[in-house]
Amino acid sequence: MSHHDPTATAAPAPDPTRDPAQDPARDLVARDLVMTYGRSGRSSAAGPPALGGVDVTVRAGESVAVMGPSGSGKTTLLHVLAGILRPTGGQVLWRGRDIARMSDRERTVLRRRDFGFVFQQGMLLPELPAIENVALPLMLDGVSRSEASGRAAALFAPLGLAGLEKRRPGELSGGQAQRVAIARALVARPGVVFADEPTGALDQTTSAEVMQHLTRLAAHTGASLVVVTHDENVARWCHGVLRVRDGRIATGTVAAQASPGSAR
């Protein structure tokens, strides 16, 4: 992998007790993705595509960094892969179904059950204590408050958050808040976690701590991880790097990068 750091800790391998390779339906596969926004000026022609025929496969249990300059299409790619945006053309296949052809309701359920999200600012609800922020996705899906709280509480110690369950987001440091957001993203044991600049508001030391927790917990649960970032140090925590330019994959494929668990 490019930008190898010999002093860095290797990205954690997926949980060996789970063999995602035996279930190819857990691969996230994009084929010929096209995404075009709006119109160009007074012309009836569509503007230049944000995505111009992208093919991506994220293997089950792999972590992938998506990098590129501002406006390259990397965040659009994440949003299309995650079912937040419906592409103009192409397919996104998950568990044998094309996400792009799902109804809005089906995609909402998908994002609640199978996909987890970590955003740059955490997006925690300020009025709720940390444990309720983490339990919220489960409760929205019909899990009882007691069960949801129990499953949420189990994630606090592994993330170095023991004792902070009752604190509200305003009482947490930036790094602690992002680790709460990671717990929320993983509490439903999703198949894929999408992280959009998850360390963009953090210093380098805290950023490394957050990425260590994110990659380790995702690997432990068997979740794939897709991280949009501009930071090479963040990308080194992932097994592979995809570089996007002008709406296309410019360099790098996951298969060509270091295998899971190898040095970055």
Image: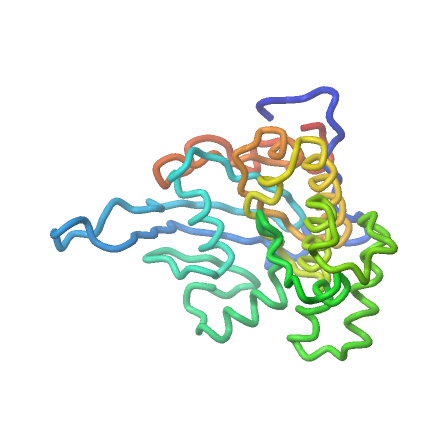
Q: Position of residue 185 (x, y in %)?
A: 67, 58
Q: Is residue 177 above or below residue 133?
A: above
Q: Which is more toward the observer, 35 or 75?
A: 75
Identify which residue is drawn at 72% across, 32% down.
205
Q: Position of residue 250 (x, y in %)?
A: 41, 32
Q: Quadrant of the C terminus?
A: top right
15 relative position to 231: left or right: right
Quadrant for residue 87, please give it. Answer: bottom left
Q: Is residue 132 above or below residue 176?
A: below
Q: Position of residue 237 (x, y in %)?
A: 67, 35
84 relative position to 40: left or right: right
- List the single residue furthest toward the front: 171
Q: Is residue 80 above or below residue 174?
A: below
31 relative position to 227: left or right: left
Q: Position of residue 34 (x, y in %)?
A: 34, 51
Q: Which is more toward the observer, 96 or 74?
A: 74
Q: Which is more toward the observer, 128 or 22?
A: 128
